[in-house]
Image (cartoon, rainbow, N blue to C red):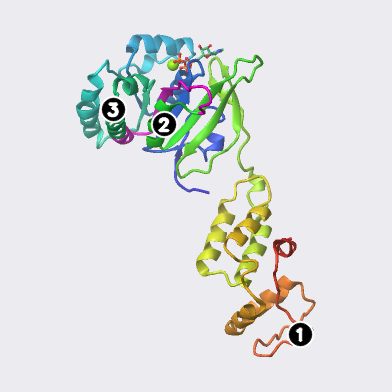
């Protein structure tokens, strides 16, 4: 579990599946076609910050601030009390944004440098900027600079309109912003009727263990969107598979896994977030590392001779399920074939039994 502080998005249900929220100074992209709810996500995100003592900066490329405030009110967010006190707008039209990116925003960052209050930044939508720049290289450069600058103010949420051609999962003009963002969620709308015809998917979320399902969401006036999720790992599930891991780690040690490999397994144990057993994953991983069949009995024996600690010897007998209860296993003693305490793993199924 990451110990880094997370900033709640305020989007009901989303924080549950992204380790509690976004990282500070990161960019989150919300991609979706028209009417999926991008502006609602953006408003909800902004409103949460304002209600929790942050400032807000809204960068719009099309609509003037008055219209944005009016539309926010229709979505149930009355921002009047924050207007020009904690909430500020940059309205950039046409080619203006080059100046915005090159001059105005860096100046703002500079002015805010020693200011303790975080500023949550919204760009809704980024699309006009993308369309205004034909050259992909230039597009990439300006988006990189824009994101880099904004991140210094606080957590940033950007929306992008998607116009996917048939057969495309994600439209071409959103690939650059996705690539440049620290996180991206994809909103889809299937006009098939029913309450949950809109759904969200997390495309990426850097340095975050995130949910991998398709999460339906609904609009709730007064809340915004509510995403239907269940927490990734419930409190009682957190340590549920520790035994499986501990056995696997002992087995790996016994099979001669390196220190680094054992550390990795401990890391995997600490970070396992799936609601199912890691057994199969461990088997596949062991196999990929040549841990199951590459080691011959002779090699194993040699290793055992090398390790002279009694503890290691006990570990082996414990793993093999040997009935030997003798406290004084002497590693120097040549083990006879009958009470051979070593294990011989030829295939995955044996390993599986052992891990069980
Ligand atoms: N409280 C609500 N109840 C029912 N439907 C709602 C509610 N809020 C929003 N909607 C529906 O969701 C639609 C899209 O909302 P929103 O403006 O957030 O989407 P968008 O992705 O920003 O769209 P656009 O491409 O027009 O910018 C609205 O047009 C409306 O049909
Ligand atoms: Mg919108």
Of labels 2 and 3, earlier in sequence is 3
In the rendered view, would you say 253 is above or below 70? below
For label 3, being within 8 Å of ligand 1 is answered: no
| Part of the protein shown in magenta | 147-169
In the rendered view, would you say 112 is above or below 256? above
The residue lying at 37 percent from left, 21 percent from top is 127
| Residue 80: in magenta span | no
SS for dot 3: loop
Q: Answer whether residue 174 is visible to the viewer in this image.
A: yes
Front residue (pair 53, 29) = 29
Q: In this rendering, would 180 be left or right of 11?
A: left
Q: In this rendering, would 304 be left or right of 341?
A: left
Q: Which mark is residue 175?
A: 2
Query: Where is residue 28 drawn, in percent x and y?
Result: 42, 32
Q: Identify the residue position indicated by label 3 in the image.
A: 135
The residue lying at 60 percent from left, 58 percent from top is 285
Q: Identify the residue position indicated by label 1 in the image.
A: 337
Quarter occupied by the C terminus: bottom right
Q: In this rendering, would 323 be left or right of 351?
A: right
Front residue (pair 210, 335) = 335
């Amino acid at each position: 579990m990451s110990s880094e502080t997370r900033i709640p998005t305020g989007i009901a249900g989303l924080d549950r599946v992204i380790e509690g929220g976004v990282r500070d100074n990161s960019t989150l992209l919300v991609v979706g076609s028209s009417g999926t709810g991008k502006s609602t996500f953006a408003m909800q995100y902004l409103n949460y910050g304002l209600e929790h003592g942050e400032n807000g900066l809204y960068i719009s490329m099309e609509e003037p601030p008055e219209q944005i405030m009016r539309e926010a009110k229709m979505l149930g967010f009355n921002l009047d009390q924050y207007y020009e006190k904690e909430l500020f707008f940059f309205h950039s039209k046409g080619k203006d944004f080059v100046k915005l990116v090159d001059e105005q925003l860096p100046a703002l960052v500079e002015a805010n440098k020693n200011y303790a209050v975080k500023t949550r930044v919204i760009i809704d939508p980024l699309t006009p900027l993308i369309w205004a720049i034909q050259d992909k290289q230039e597009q990439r450069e300006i988006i990189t600079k824009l994101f880099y600058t904004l991140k210094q103010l606080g957590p940033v949420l950007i929306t992008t309109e998607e116009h996917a051609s048939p057969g495309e999962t994600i439209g071409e003009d959103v690939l650059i912003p996705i690539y440049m963002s620290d996180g991206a969620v994809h909103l889809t709308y299937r006009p098939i009727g029913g309450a949950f015809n809109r759904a969200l998917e997390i495309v990426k979320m850097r340095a975050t263990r995130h949910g991998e399902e398709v999460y339906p969401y609904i609009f709730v006036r007064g809340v915004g969107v509510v995403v239907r999720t269940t927490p990734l790992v419930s409190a009682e599930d957190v340590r549920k598979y520790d035994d499986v891991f501990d056995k696997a780690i002992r087995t790996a040690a016994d099979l001669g896994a390196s220190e680094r490999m054992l550390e990795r397994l401990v890391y995997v144990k600490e970070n396992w977030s799936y609601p199912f057993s890691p057994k199969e994953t461990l088997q596949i991983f062991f196999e990929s590392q040549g841990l199951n069949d590459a080691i011959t009995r002779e090699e194993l024996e040699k290793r055992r001779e090398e390790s002279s600690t009694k503890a290691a010897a006990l570990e082996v007998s414990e793993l093999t399920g040997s009935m030997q209860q003798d406290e004084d296993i002497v590693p120097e003693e040549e083990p006879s074939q009958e009470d051979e305490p070593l294990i011989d793993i030829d295939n995955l199924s044996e390993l599986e039994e052992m891990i069980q």
